[in-house]
Image: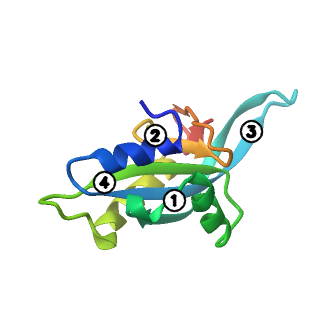
Amino acid sequence: MIRDFEDLLVLAHSMDEPQRLLVLLAKAETQTSAEGDLQGGVLTPVICVDKAPGEIKDFRSLVAEADGVTRDWDMMLVASMGGSDGRAPSSEDAQPHLDRIANDILTGQDLTRYAIFDRNENLIVVEPRHGLPGIAV
């Protein structure tokens, strides 16, 4: 079970085949009722990148690298892609999967297959929001 980003890195390093981590940063926008009660929110993809697990020191260094590109993000979605025959997937191999993560967000698909962290490395649980693009946070 993944409790934090370090668990995710340890798991990626322990797999039989080399892995590539797929990281998508998203902006969260909350929605409130007329009374001001939190009703949920919508995620919008901002940027994505793929990295070998060995290229990531820890969560804080990944956040610092991301913030060097843009600070306009609130959530980090992460998935792992396995290689084969001892060869890690390439960035080219990863691109369609990164596109799928972005599309899953935009079309309101189930995001439970991704590890999702906020900027403070808190693991986030999401629920699909039926009938509307995006997700309820």
Task: Give the left or right position of residue 92, taking residue 118 as reference.
Answer: left
Tell which of 35 and 102 is nearer to you.
102
Mark 4 lies on a secondary structure that is strand
Q: Earlier in the sequence, mark 4 or mark 2?
A: 2
Circle 3 packing at 10 Å, graded few (<14), some (14-19), many (20+), is some
* Left-right relation of 36 to 104: right
- Tell which tag, 4 or 1, sits nearer the viewer: 1
Q: CA distance from mark 4 to mark 1?
A: 18 Å
Label 2: how many residues lie within 10 Å, few (<14), some (14-19) or many (20+)?
Answer: few
The crowd level at tag 4 (other Cα within 10 Å; few <14, some 14-19, many 20+) is: some
Q: From the viewer's side, name the closer residue of 109 and 112.
A: 112
**What numbered label is drawn on residue 57?**
1
3 or 1: tag closer to the N-terminus? 3
**Mark closest to the chain's N terminus, 3 or 2:** 2
Can residue 100 be spotted in the picture?
Answer: yes
Q: Which residue is situated farthest in the right direction here?
A: 35
Question: Residue at label 4?
Answer: 81
Q: Amino acid at mark 1?
A: Lys
Q: Which residue is mark 3?
A: 31
**Mark closest to the chain's N terminus, 3 or 4:** 3
Q: Residue at x 71, y 62 (%)?
A: 72
Of the two numbered discs 1 and 2 on the same chain, state the one appearing first in sequence.
2
